[in-house]
Amino acid sequence: MGGSGGGGAFINRTPGELRDIVRKAEDKTTVAAFEAELGRTLGSLLGEYNGRDVETARSRLEVLKTALKGSIEGSYDQLFGGSVAKHTYVDGLSDIDSLVLINDSALEGKSPGEVLASMEKTIAEKLREKAKVEHGRMAVTVDYGDGMVVQLLPAIRTDDQQLRVPSSRTQGWSKINPLTFQEALTRRNQECGGKLVPTIKLAKAINGQLPEGQRLSGYHMESLGIAAFRDYHGDKTTSAMLPTFLERARELVLSPIRDSTGQSVHVDDYLGVANSEARQTASHILGRLARRMRNATAAGSTAQWRALFGLDQ
């Protein structure tokens, strides 16, 4: 009745069967090694997001809001923060740290550019060269020089009490409801184990490698992410969720977004009506990117994955 020592599985096996067993074991080991390497690669791209000192970010936010005291009536912090690619042209709400509500009679009726310039000047005077302060089309960016970048997005309240933020595509204020959007994004992110926001960030980094005329807006990408991962039950990792996002977005982009965010077509009306030529082109591009990801994974190639982000192979 002695134990077999675990070798029973190999008794009475033909040489061919044994080779198959060994090959499958090697393949499993190879796949596991690739998945670990891919996880490290994507993690390094998200380094600023994943490694962020939340308490320091929160403390710095308080200083910035104190500097703006008298010009704002309140703020909504989310601390998703940390774009994959640092820039002053914020791509969407998941890239900002705080939505600040402007309440300054001197800025009433002003354009986003004028409001942003005023915020930049006020903050720069307060910090006195302790950080680099500048603004883009949508937000004020404060770069502390130690790897942390904090971004503030201004919002105004209209006569009908709706909030508006700077448009990513025009010089005016957008019709997006930022608070409803933020709540929907936060809720879906929690449902996905906190992996939806980093997945969207990586998708937007890939989107940023496309020619400007082919890029989807940041708000649109975020809205697609919220819709794509409704009732998601797959692996909650960025390597699994990225191709899933692009594959589902390929279908979703063909119709104007109507989601629980309440944004309706305001997010993607730049693509026109359902099944427009622009939407079909966007769908084709998203599908092509998803195939490249699947092919890179099938080939076990992190170099092919890195190429999607415009990184050297």
Image: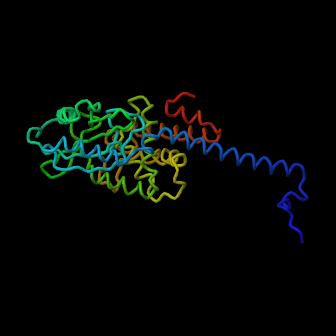
**Total numbered labels placed on residues in the image:** 0
Determine the residue positioned at 14% across, 43% down: 71
Q: Taking 202 as reference, is 6 above or below it?
A: below
- Residue found at the very far left of the displayed protein: 105
Q: Is residue 160 left or right of residue 95?
A: left
Determine the residue positioned at 44% across, 51% down: 228
Residue 199 at x, y = what percent? 46, 46
Q: Taking 196 as reference, is 152 above or below it?
A: above
- Residue found at the very far bottom of the displayed protein: 1
In the picture, the quarter occupied by the N terminus is: bottom right
In the picture, the quarter occupied by the C terminus is: top right
Q: Is residue 256 left or right of residue 137?
A: right
Q: How is the image coloured?
A: rainbow
Determine the residue positioned at 39% across, 45% down: 53
Determine the residue positioned at 16% across, 49% down: 73
Residue 190 at x, y = what percent? 42, 57
Residue 306 at x, y = what percent? 54, 34
2 or 244, which lies in front? 2
Name the image quarter holding residue 144. Answer: top left
Residue 208 at x, y = what percent? 42, 33
